[in-house]
Amino acid sequence: QQKKWAILTFHLAMIVILLGAGITRYFGQEGMMHIREDGSSDYFLSSETFLQMEVQDRDQKYAVAEPVHFASLGKNSFQQSYLFGGREVRVELEDFIPNPQEILVEDEQGVPTLKVVIGGENGREEYFVRSGDRARIRGTLFNFGNPAEAGAFNIAYRDGQLSFLTNMPFTQMQMANRQLDTIPPGKQSPLLLRSLYSNGLQSFVFGAFTEHGNTELISSSQKMTNSSLGGLALKVSLGDETRQVYLAGSKGMEGAPRSLALGDLRLSMSYGARRINLPFSIRLNDFIMDRYPGTNSASSYASEVTLIDPRTDLVRDQRIYMNNILNYKGYRFFQSSYDQDELGTYLSVNDDAWGTWVSYLGYFLLTVGMALTFFSSKSRFAQVARKLKKVRTPQTAVAGLAIGFFLCLPAFGRGSLPPELNMSVV
């Protein structure tokens, strides 16, 4: 019976370990949290990529987040149908575009579209803002064709004329003649193409405009890296009405949403990491970097953080560094990376309490099974050990005599050599 218990424990341990792996795979969440000094965050971005949709149907709102995995090599396929208010919306992948580059094209069914050019960290960056979009680009909210919002750069297109309204003072410099004008806040002013707009914090140029435009994605390179963008060409259908949508995103980054209308449904779609909200927040008080003497190489780095949980009025300070994690309510935070200016930190987040404990239980049962196998007197291991003990004594004696005899032979041989042969070679 004891032997059967050992086998049962082994099998049960394997089942529990597999169960823990399944819980981790289908219910666990992993991602990355970015915090700047003196700032806080109550969410992290998933490590997986998702195709996300938000649908507005009159007074009803729906949200869908579908995990997807696409690659530049091999065949990519995706086709799903969703019911929103009793109506079926079909989404189908037409093409996956590695390292996509967005271009503006004329489209009879397109909408007014502006190209925005901004100087970024890597030089010239181009973005496209279409009528109906609310796009935050490099800290500036561009609101095109929607009701005016405070704090936004509100753009309108009426009677063939572009104009803008903002509650912040802007300067406008025409690139052709270098004429500089100051635009007062709260005044509807004409929007000029190829003119530099600046508010002291951000500068941008509207490079092009088309009344009936659309954007397409083309691949600039087939080689993909961990930081490369991926583009999706999607076909979205409602009944006989079909729209083509281009999305771009990558792992660890929220995708820029694209808006479209199908019948009386308004959809917002994006591709990239999913934002996962937390029931608490973490504040970064200080990021500390230690270096090897005489070099700029980091020897260690740590984050001084404060955990804030308003549900329990908890405020707790903790230092996160290598092998010293923050563990709270099933969430584990690890020190992962940091910003180049050393004023921000990246924390790796793991939310898998059930999967972890179930796996630990499986490892414990595996250890118990091994102990029963090794130390039980009725186990196969003990039976083999007893048989070896019975045959070991006579066989060991004979083997010892044989080994000793053969070890002595070389010594006898050397001693019996003739004197004329037993000489050293110089």
Image (cartoon, rainbow, N blue to C red):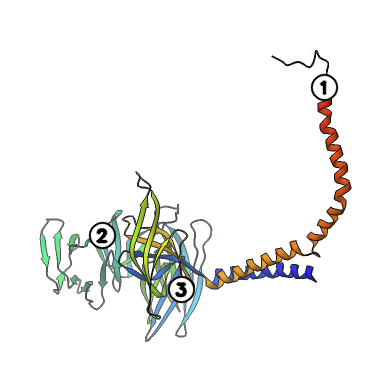
Residue at position x 29%, y 55% in the image = 121
**Are discs 2 and 3 less than 8 Å apart at CB?**
no
Q: Tell me if 260 is positioned left or right of 166 in this view.
A: right
Mark 2 residue element: strand
Identity of the residue furthest to the top in this view: 420
Between the residue at mark 2 and the residue at mark 1, the CA separation in whole angstroms equals 96 Å
Quarter of the figure with the N terminus: bottom right
Q: Which residue is mark 3?
A: 65
First reached walking from the N terminus: tag 2 or tag 1: 2
The image shows residue 242 at horizontal and vertical percentages of 42, 74
Residue drawn at (69%, 67%), measured in percent from left and top? 368
Answer left or right for 122 relative to 352: left
How crowded is the residue under tag 3: few (<14 C-alpha within 10 Å), some, or many (20+)?
some
Screen quadrant of the C terminus: top right
User: Which residue type does callout 1 highlight?
Assistant: Gly
Query: Residue 335 versus residue 351: which sits nearer the camera?
Result: 335
How far across and how far down the image is residue 223, in percent?
45, 52
Q: Secondary structure at mark 1?
A: helix
Q: Residues within 10 Å of mark 2 (few under 14, many from 20)?
A: some
334, above or below 354, in the image: above
**Quadrant hosting residue 111:** bottom left
The residue lying toward the viewer, choosing from 14 and 159, is 14
For marks 1 and 3, the one nearer the N-term is: 3
**What amino acid is at disc 3?**
Ala
Snapshot quadrant of residue 104: bottom left
Can you see residue 27?
A: no
Q: Is residue 45 visible?
A: yes
Q: Residues within 10 Å of mark 1 (few under 14, many from 20)?
A: few
